[in-house]
Image (cartoon, rainbow, N blue to C red):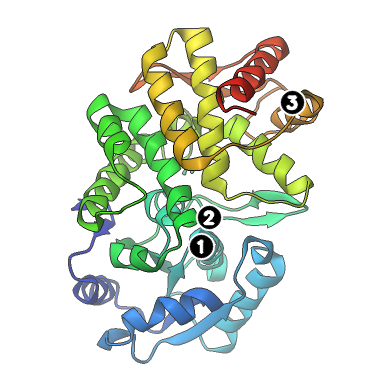
Amino acid sequence: MDNAGVILCQDLNREVTEALNLCAPDKLFILSDETTQALCYPLLHNIDVLKHAHQIVIKTGDIHKNLETLSYVWQSLSDNGATRHSLLLCLGGGMVTDLGGFAASTFKRGINYINIPTTLLAMVDAAVGGKTAINFNGLKNEIGVFQPAFRVLIETEFLRTLDAHNLFSGYAEMLKHGLISNYETLNELLAFDITNIDYNLLKQLVGKSISVKESIVQKDPKEQGIRKALNLGHTIGHAFESLALSRLHPVLHGYAVAWGLVCELYLSYANVQFPRDVMRRVIHFIHENYGSFIFTCDDYEELYQFMLHDKKNKGGVINFTLLNDVGELRLNQTASQGLIYETLDFYRECMGI
Ligand code: GLY
């Protein structure tokens, strides 16, 4: 499968070799973090074209997705003779592919990079679609550019060593892709047993999920319109993520998105008649697999403030992507404070908190 540069690999060695032969860099650099260096790099060690690559290893974790780490990557490229014809291969989750993509896109005004995502979240979302970024001034993904990778090589074998929480986290973005595409895809995702994984089937679902994202990104690479579909679940999801962070109990991004989907499906039902039975089925799946984010009505104002400061807003109006039905998008929707509070009431009631 080839989605304009995204390849679901049957043979990673062959795909890496082909991509590098096509690109013919003068020097090759591999960026990984301490975790992917230890767990994932060994799967690449027998690939001949990588034998003389220079390794750049950064610390693991979103707190290191910052200017200091970016500077370290630029410095390593510079000190080791990278030119405009060199290539950076990013091996890792979204932190590595976001930061590495940004480092590559800005070094000498831009060198090629290849993403080999190692988490489910990065495979179906972060590493695909050309968004690169670092966090800045306490804000997530505040500085970055849109610059697609030369190739994104998807090797689902990496998922066999991924912990359950990170699998569930990525799966939330797949559910989102199901909701914005069609009933067939959504039903397959809801029927999949995520607690007892059939990795061959998961690979097929990952391929479909990437196709959903790629077809949207091809139409609107810089998020002027239809790419906002990918924000479903994220306006309230980001508010949950920020509240959790402010309480010093961070949650994985995909969990916040799953809980955000519960709320934004309710908003879709209340505002644009999304079918109630489908909403209930999706909420049931999320409740069963993701548990619930705990908050009380005393937290509503803070959550609302986080939504008001979402970077997707324009003119201080909270921007939601909603659905009239599965695959039927309603972009640039808004909701009153009263309806948002009603949504948070609904969430607490149906998630049993
Ligand atoms: N993660 C949403 C996007 O790539 O647009």
Residue 32 is situated, as x and y percent measured from the top left of the image, at 49, 75
Q: Nearer the viewer, residue 248 or 148?
A: 248
What residue appears at the point 54 percent right and 71 percent down from the top-left corner?
108
Task: Tell me the mark number nearer the camera, choosing from 2 and 1.
Answer: 2
Figure check: 329 above or below 224: above
Q: Quadrant of residue 187?
A: top left
Task: Tell me the mark number nearer the camera, choosing from 2 and 3.
Answer: 3
Q: Residues at badges 2 and 3 in contact (C-beta under 8 Å)? A: no
Task: Tell me the mark number nearer the camera, choosing from 1 and 3.
Answer: 3
Q: Which residue is mark 2?
A: 132
Give the left or right position of residue 132, taking residue 201 as reference: right
Given the image, on which type of amino acid does mark 1 rest?
Answer: Ser
Q: Which mark is residue 105?
A: 1
What residue appears at the point 30 percent right and 54 percent down from the top-left corner?
197
Q: Which residue is mark 3?
A: 304
Q: Residues at badges 2 and 1 in contact (C-beta under 8 Å)? A: yes
Q: Secondary structure at mark 2?
A: loop
Figure check: 68 above or below 203: below
Given the image, on which type of amino acid does mark 2 rest?
Answer: Thr
Residue 90 is situated, as x and y percent measured from the top left of the image, at 44, 70
Q: Secondary structure at mark 3?
A: helix
- Quick one: label 2 or label 3, which is nearer the N terminus? 2
Q: Is residue 162 visible?
A: yes
- Quick one: label 1 or label 3, which is nearer the N terminus? 1
User: Distance of mark 1 from mark 3, alpha carbons?
Assistant: 35 Å
